[in-house]
Image (cartoon, rainbow, N blue to C red):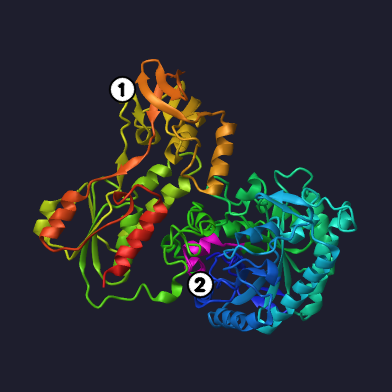
Amino acid sequence: MFEKLFSPLKIRSMELKNRVVMPAMGTRMASIDGEITDKLIAYHAARAKGGCGLNIVEVSAVHSASAPGFFVSIAEDSLVEGHRRLTEAIHEAGGKAGVQLWQGSIAAMMDAKGRAELLVVSDMDYAGRKLEAITKEKIAEIVQCYKDAARRCVEAGYDCIEFHCAHNYLPHSFLSGGINHRTDEYGGSFENRARFPLEVIRAIREAIPEEMPLLMRIGAQDDNLPGGLTIEEVIAFCKLAGSAGVDVLDISRGNIITAASMYEVPPIDIPRGFNVENAARIRRETGMLTMAVGRINHADQAEAILDADKADLIVMGRAQLADPEFCNKAKDGRVDDIVYCVGCNQGCYDGFCDMAHFPNITCMRNPQLGREGEGLMEKTKTPRKVWIAGGGMGGMEAALVLKARGHAPEIFESSGRLGGQFILAGLAPGKDEMKAAALAMGHQVEMAGIPVHYETELTPGLIEEGKPDAVIAAIGAAPIQLPVPGIEQAYQANDVLEEKVAPSGNVCVIGGGLVGLETADFLAEKGCKVTIVEMKDAIGADLGILRKIAVMQKMYGLQVKMLTNALCQAVTGDGVVVKIGDEEQLVACDAVVSAVGSKARDTGALEEACGEYHIPCTVIGDAKAARRALNAVAEGFEAAVALK
């Protein structure tokens, strides 16, 4: 299947077996000093073994003083041996290895050690610090650093190099008129702004063999950045870069100083393939080999892009985070077996940024991410009968992992379907991928031969009768009923999303978290005039960074009114009485929807029954505490691998 996607391509001397590229996604799997770790090697080897044509090793720092901790570095000769172990592992797994050369500018502020040097093109205030523009002497030093790093890449056995010239990093900062405000020969005119990145390209090209391909990641345009790059300027620069030695254009989008950061790791709110037409235009007008990037997570989508002659290669990053076997499964036609990325951003971006709670990136759909070398899926020597209460995402994850390891799981689901809250989330506008993922996971449960008892609550009586060897309680959470007068007049958000009820006219949504926002979106799309009232000082506090940007932009576009620090006092026939500061006011409306969150369902009776018969009982997901799907799936996985 997907003949074009899995057709070979030769670039200079590098022969790729297919058109799928694993991009240089930051993982924080390197050591504190930027060394390649066994964890990073296992992560890349798994994707190469899974059939990926080209793995590009992420954001590899070229300059030691500005290299953040836990980011890959290739800034010193001592690091070459680790890179060589990585390329050998990728090659042994049947793939090709690329490396992305990177100087992060203000992104180096993510340094875990807190001392990385911040290099900026122009004087700027950033995160409470006054940063001075890089000097011409330092510019020359950085160019030499790129050249030295390129030499090391050759020594390490990489098949190609990618030059990162996007996302606010130093080369992009020089190129963009929205960031570069210099008045010397490196600023002002387009020709001057292009000087530094072209110097870097030439330096890299000088340091590598003629037959070695050079790729370049570049944004199609500067969104939300006054004076920034237009696509016409990008095309002009790409032509210059091609003349300087670049072979392939990796067309990205976004920057980290404006709301356009949502385009770098686009969440579900951004349309799939949103940047493909930009890549197609750049390819057409430059005549260069081009990679399409941006929410391309299905093989048929990738095949259609290639078939329409819009790109030569397809970047499929999060698709392979969610399922490292994506390529093999797609090539073999096993599309129903693929675990698809849904653009939730909970693990790959929010987890990456949350250094306090996550050692490295993870994935809601794939809790094994970053743990590929730990042998977690080893077959059991003592098969157990495991009963799972609840068929949501966490319960299904536990069941599938248990089955794969040789246990005998059964799911008891009180409703008539699998998927739980994830199906509900998929009912909001633009979130159909979530519903599809839940339904697909349910189909995988069925294909695995796992018994599912629908409309059957796992009770103490069933425990007494069946005596399973272990129980996993994944019964989720129930909506909170706000304790204010008249609340019984309000609809529940779940009922609105499932279209059991249909509020109309002016609607007040109590609660400005994720569920409240998605309910407001749902109602506004149907023509309602919506007001959200939230007791906290911020709307969307439980959303991830990039999803919040996208969702809030949509709220403004739909003209949803939002009141914060508004404590609900009562629901009346005229609307909702709220207290803001010391004053009460009425939010007049025709209907009220309660979306104030959920609380864990009581597992006490189930745990007590298990305790009576000495049956291990593990509570996971929202039944433990109402949180995100990331937690539920991870805990389902952990419960399943912990059973020996």
Q: Main secondary structure of the magenta part?
A: helix
In this rendered view, identify the residue nearer to me: 40 or 465: 40
Left/right placement of residue 310 relative to residue 446 reads right
Q: Is residue 355 visible?
A: yes
Q: Residues within 10 Å of mark 1 (few under 14, many from 20)?
A: few
Q: What whole-number distance in Å separates the C-alpha atoms at marks 1 and 2?
A: 54 Å
Query: Mark 2, residues whose alpha carbon is within 10 Å: few (<14), some, or many (≥20)?
Result: many
Q: Looking at the picture, does residue 217 appear above or below residue 453?
A: below
Residue under the image location 15 percent in, 58 percent down: 610
Disc 2 secondary structure class: helix
Residue 174 figure quarter: bottom right
Q: Position of residue 436 (x, y in %)?
A: 43, 50
Q: Which mark is residue 43?
A: 2
The amino acid beneath tag 1 is Pro
Where the C terminus falls, by quadrant?
bottom left
Q: Is residue 576 above or below residue 203?
A: above
Nearest the viewer among 358 and 16 is 358
The part of the chain drawn in magenta is 315-331
Total numbered badges shown on the rendered structure: 2
Disc 2 residue type? Tyr
- The answer to whether one can see residue 447 in this image is no
Percent x, y for residue 438? Answer: 39, 52
Quadrant in the picture for residue 304 = bottom right
**In front here: 598 or 424?**
598
The image position of residue 357, as x and y in percent, is 46, 59
**Which mark's residue is nearer the viewer, 1 or 2?**
1
Q: Quadrant of residue 312?
A: bottom right
Query: What residue lies at 26% left-to-right and 69% top-to-bottom?
Result: 643
Q: Which mark is residue 485?
A: 1
Helix, strand or loop at mark 1: loop
Closer to the chain start, of discs 1 and 2, is 2
x and y percentages locating residue 614 in the rendered image:
13, 64
